[in-house]
Image (cartoon, rainbow, N blue to C red):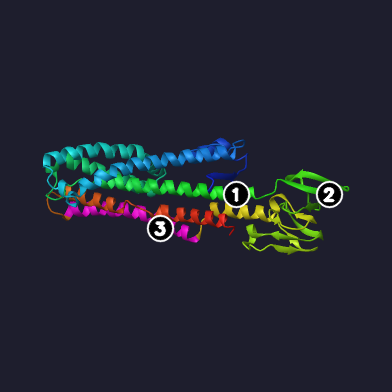
């Protein structure tokens, strides 16, 4: 493999490889072994089709969030009965039955809303690594198992330690899935901003060749062609004015709302709008070399690259997850060796508490989501 480029905004990867050393099937297997799904880049899918696929994925994540959020409401209320007066008088037998119902509901949350975390954690485990999926899966899974045990056999636990953590399971998964849905929506808006930039480009150009004016697709304009632009038309490509004069609206590039006067020798930029007079200009940059194409390429590169703060977040996450797991193990050993009786129960309770407290890890979600939103807003405003 020579080089690899991954765009978080479009969800696409570009891999340059040497066919004599590896194959496309081997590359696909390597990607799938990391826990990702591989599909060929769409060639004939329309923009509307891409938006429909993106919208379906967003709705899938958002529905998972809604289900987890719906279960979170009763789980939180019954976890803190002192918040509402009528909950304080619930008999212990009724509360135990409620906890049984919550056990079933939160298990559904784990299976339906949180399945992605467990699959991601398993994929990381197969490669002898740990990530945020590992921590979320361990924290919510341990909280649910502890809660079920506390509900079924509360007498095994010391006084005051048999309270279930069903609220933690539902709330943590709901918040993290919501973060994923918002990140996906931010990526979609960033890609939509790129499409809007591409939509600014003129579709045709009036080219003067052999003394005749020809209306050609903008893709057929060549460097050196003489192009005529009339009032109200878009400048199709970049070039230099040869004769005529006009005022050109360049707000889509510069943000300046006042049209700029253009005389012979002045540069014009593709996708800007000619406001008043007509002029001829000589094409100097076409296709992927135009200013608009370079702006789009910069936005796409920004989507696929990582800012320094994001690299720091990745480094911190790489140390944070194993550190939490080591602390949980150390806590278990310390309480098992030096804690009061029953030592095993106290060791389990304290180690689970470490995993539960460390479970809501916004670090791995906030940084990429904020970057995606920032890039999208910049593209929308021509920055």
Q: Quadrant of the N terminus?
A: top right
Q: Secondary structure at mark 2?
A: strand
CA distance separating discs 1 and 3? 36 Å
Q: x, y percentage for residue 200?
A: 65, 50
Does the stretch in magenta take in 172?
no
Magenta range is: 308-337
Q: Which residue is mark 3?
A: 316
Residue furthest right as drawn: 211
Is residue 103 shown to the viewer in this render?
Answer: yes
Question: Residue, x 26% and y 53% (percent of image)?
Answer: 354
Quadrant of the rendered structure where residue 124 is? top left
Tag 1 and tag 2, C-beta contact below 8 Å = no
The label shown at residue 379 is none
Q: Mark 2 Cα within 10 Å, few/some/many (few <14, many 20+)? A: some
Number of numbered labels in the structure image: 3
The residue at which mark 2 appears reads as 208
- Residue at 39%, 47% in the rendered image: 178
| Location of residue 226 in the rendering, given as x and y in whole percent from the top left corner | 82, 53
Residue that label 1 marks? 196
User: With respect to residue 360, does 18 lie above or below?
Assistant: above
> Camera-side residue: 231 or 183?
231
């Amino acid at each position: 493999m020579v080089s690899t480029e991954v765009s978080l905004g479009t969800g696409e990867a570009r891999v340059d490889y040497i066919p004599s050393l590896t194959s496309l099937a081997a590359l696909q297997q390597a990607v799938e072994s990391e826990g990702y799904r591989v599909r060929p880049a769409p060639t004939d899918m329309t923009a509307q089709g891409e938006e429909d696929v993106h919208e379906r994925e967003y709705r899938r994540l958002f529905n998972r969030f809604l289900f987890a959020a719906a279960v979170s409401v009763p789980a939180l209320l019954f976890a803190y009965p002192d918040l509402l007066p009528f909950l304080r008088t619930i008999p212990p037998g009724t509360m135990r039955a409620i906890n049984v119902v919550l056990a079933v509901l939160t298990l559904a949350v784990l299976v339906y809303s949180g399945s992605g975390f467990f699959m991601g954690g398993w994929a990381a485990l197969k490669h002898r690594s740990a990530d945020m999926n590992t921590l979320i899966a361990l924290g919510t899974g341990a909280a649910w198992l502890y809660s079920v045990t506390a509900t079924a056999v509360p007498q095994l636990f010391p006084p005051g330690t048999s309270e279930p953590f069903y609220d933690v399971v539902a709330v943590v998964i709901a918040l993290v899935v919501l973060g994923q849905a918002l990140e996906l929506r931010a990526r979609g808006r960033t890609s939509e901003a790129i499409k809007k930039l591409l939509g600014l480009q003129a579709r045709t150009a009036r080219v003067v060749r052999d003394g005749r004016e020809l209306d050609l697709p903008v893709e057929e304009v060549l460097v050196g062609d003489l192009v005529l632009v009339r009032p109200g038309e878009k400048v199709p490509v970049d070039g230099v004015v040869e004769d005529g004069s006009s005022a050109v609206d360049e707000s889509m590039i510069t943000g300046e709302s006042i049209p700029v006067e253009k005389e012979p020798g002045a540069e014009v930029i593709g996708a800007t709008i000619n406001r008043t007079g007509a002029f001829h200009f000589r094409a100097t940059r076409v296709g992927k070399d135009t200013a608009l194409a370079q702006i789009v390429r910069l936005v796409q590169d920004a989507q696929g690259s990582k800012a320094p703060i994001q690299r720091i977040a990745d480094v911190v996450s790489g140390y944070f997850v194993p550190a939490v797991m080591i602390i949980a193990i150390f806590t278990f050993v310390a309480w098992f060796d030096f804690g009061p009786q029953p030592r095993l129960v106290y060791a389990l309770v304290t180690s689970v508490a470490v995993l539960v407290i460390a479970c809501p890890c916004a670090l791995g979600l906030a940084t990429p989501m904020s970057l995606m939103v920032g890039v999208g807003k910049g593209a929308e405003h021509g920055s």
